[in-house]
Image (cartoon, rainbow, N blue to C red):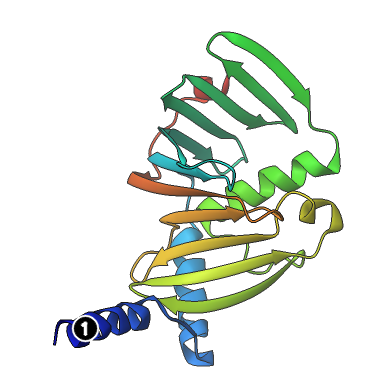
Amino acid sequence: MKYIVLFCTLFTFSLLAQETKLTAQELSAFKQRVEQETKSLKSIRTDFEQSKHMAFLSNDIQSKGKMYLRSDGSLKWEYTSPNVYSVIFKNNSILINDNGKKSTVSGEQDMFKKINHLISGSVSGKLFDDKEFNISYYKSGKNILVKLIPNNKTLKKYISEVNLYFPQQDATVSKVKLIEPSGDFTLITFINKELNVQIDPSIFNH
């Protein structure tokens, strides 16, 4: 009897985890909602929890911090645990502050622009019509899952797939999963998200 119960439980969980492609009507409604609700999006401020999975490590690497995004493309990841450092994407450059040790990486190269666009677009949900990705849409549990596979050869060297998770009644991303060609991945979960709040420009200073 207990084996029957166990089988039924596992079968139920497998059904819950299934991904079902959106119908044309569901897809149209989802795109319209996201487009409409993000049209006036000026800024996002949110806490995040990040889990980095690497095949050769027995445990995932966990970290926490805050993320700031403005409509002008300025983006800051501020890690507060377990290490203190920040990464700022601003004016085609990457500004790094590793516990007081500052450095700047010139971002004139096309790669940096693509990475910045990928991250900020993932957070705000504005990648749907990007011709550099093959995009598919699914229902996954209580979420809408958007899968983006890069068409750009340079980007493919670093990212093989991006998964965006939208709660079904939310127009902004709740989780982002960045999958590398090796199979390693980074999962970022946003919590305490605030939209269209005033963000001091000095936040993006090096």
Which quadrant of the figure contains the C terminus? top right
Residue drawn at 44 percent across, 55 percent down? 175
Tell me residue 181's x, y (percent).
72, 56
Q: Is residue 102 above or below residue 1?
A: above
Q: Is residue 62 above or below residue 94?
A: below
Residue drawn at 54 percent across, 24 percent down? 86
Foreground residue, 21 or 53?
Answer: 53
Q: Residue furthest left?
A: 1
Mark 1 lies on residue: 3
Residue 17 falls in image quadrant:
bottom left
* Residue 3 as seen in the image, left or right of residue 190: left
Which quadrant of the figure contains the N terminus? bottom left
Q: Is residue 56 above or below residue 7?
A: above
Residue drawn at 64 percent across, 66 percent down? 148
Q: Is residue 141 above or below residue 92?
A: below
Within 10 Å of disc 1 (Cα), the crowding (few <14, some 14-19, many 20+) is few
Tell me residue 135's x, y (percent).
65, 73
Tell me residue 179's x, y (percent).
62, 55
Residue 99 in view of the camera: yes
Q: How many marks do you count on the picture?
A: 1
* Residue 120 as seen in the image, left or right of residue 46: right
Q: Residue furthest top?
A: 100
Residue drawn at 40 percent across, 40 percent down? 48
